[in-house]
Image (cartoon, coloured by chain):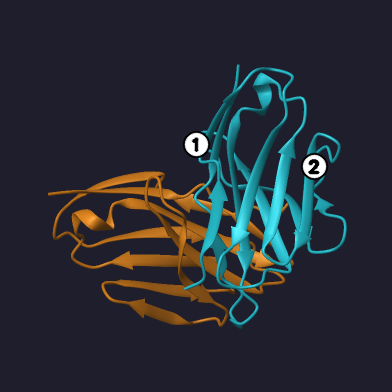
Amino acid sequence: ILNVEQSPQSLHVQEGDSTNFTCSFPSSNFYALHWYRWETAKSPEALFVMTLNGDEKKKGRISATLNTKEGYSYLYIKGSQPEDSATYLCAFSILKYIFGTGTRLKVLA
Amino acid sequence: GAVVSQHPSRVICKSGTSVKIECRSLDFQATTMFWYRQFPKQSLMLMATSNEGSKATYEQGVEKDKFLINHASLTLSTLTVTSAHPEDSSFYICSARDHRETNEKLFFGSGTQLSVL
């Protein structure tokens, strides 16, 4: 059974703090790792799709790294803002998409 | 980016009734759509893969006669929960890939919260 684990489950940070979350996935037969941001009452929105070991992607204050050999990806948010409050999901795709339970981030003003 | 519209966003129904949820790709053609279900504090669980013009592929443990999927056009897939029971109460969400994009990211609807009384 393929399993994707995310930690922490939830996180409260102060505005301006930097933070990071972890996504662990099976390291064998890797195809792609996705990160999504899901705000309450909205649709999940794709942040990154990563395919290469050592890959690092950046979108504004958010960046992600990928280690396919050891089966983990980190998502970093620099200088968190209240609008960053959301659930961050990762998904491992190999024929189908397997999601983690997400990290719920709350940024306090 | 591509937009996926899902309706209704919330539905409350009596036990034994059927509920239809629609998922539309608004600005792209989706040959494949995915239906997920999420229980509180759990991950999105794939229920089935909906293929335009052919039968859906159901995941193990998902009753195809209970959860009817129709993907009659390139922009519309529907999920019908037949003879709904309280244990079917859950959050249902659809997604699709825009095949114009090469990175296979998913575009999601906003989900449907189903409550069966």
Q: Which chain is cyan?
A: B
Report the residue marked by disc 2. Answer: B68
Taking the spot 67% from the left edge, 50% from the top edge, the residue there is B35
Kindly indicate the quadrant of the structure image that contains residue B51: bottom right
Vertical side of B55 occupied by B65: above or below: above
The nearer-to-camera label among 2 and 1 is 2
Left or right: A93, with A81 as reference point: right
| Residue B99 picture location, percent across and down | 65, 78
Three-letter amino acid code of the residue under disc 1: Lys
Is there any visible trace of residue A70 in the rendered image? Answer: no
Task: Name the secondary structure under disc 2.
Answer: strand
Image-quadrant location for residue B68: top right
Q: Secondary structure at mark 1?
A: loop
User: What is the x, y in percent for residue A89?
Assistant: 47, 56
Front residue of A70 and B45: B45
Asked if disc 2 and disc 1 are in contact, CB closer than 8 Å, the reply is: no
Q: Which residue is mark 1?
A: B41
Q: Is residue A94 above or below residue A22?
A: below
Q: Note the chain letter of the orange one.
A: A
What residue is rendered at 35% in x and 73% in y?
A: A63
Cα gap from disc 2 to disc 1, whole angstroms: 25 Å
Residue B91 visible in the snapshot: yes
Q: Residues within 10 Å of mark 2 (few under 14, many from 20)?
A: some
| Circle 2 chain | B
Name which residue type carries label 2. Answer: Leu
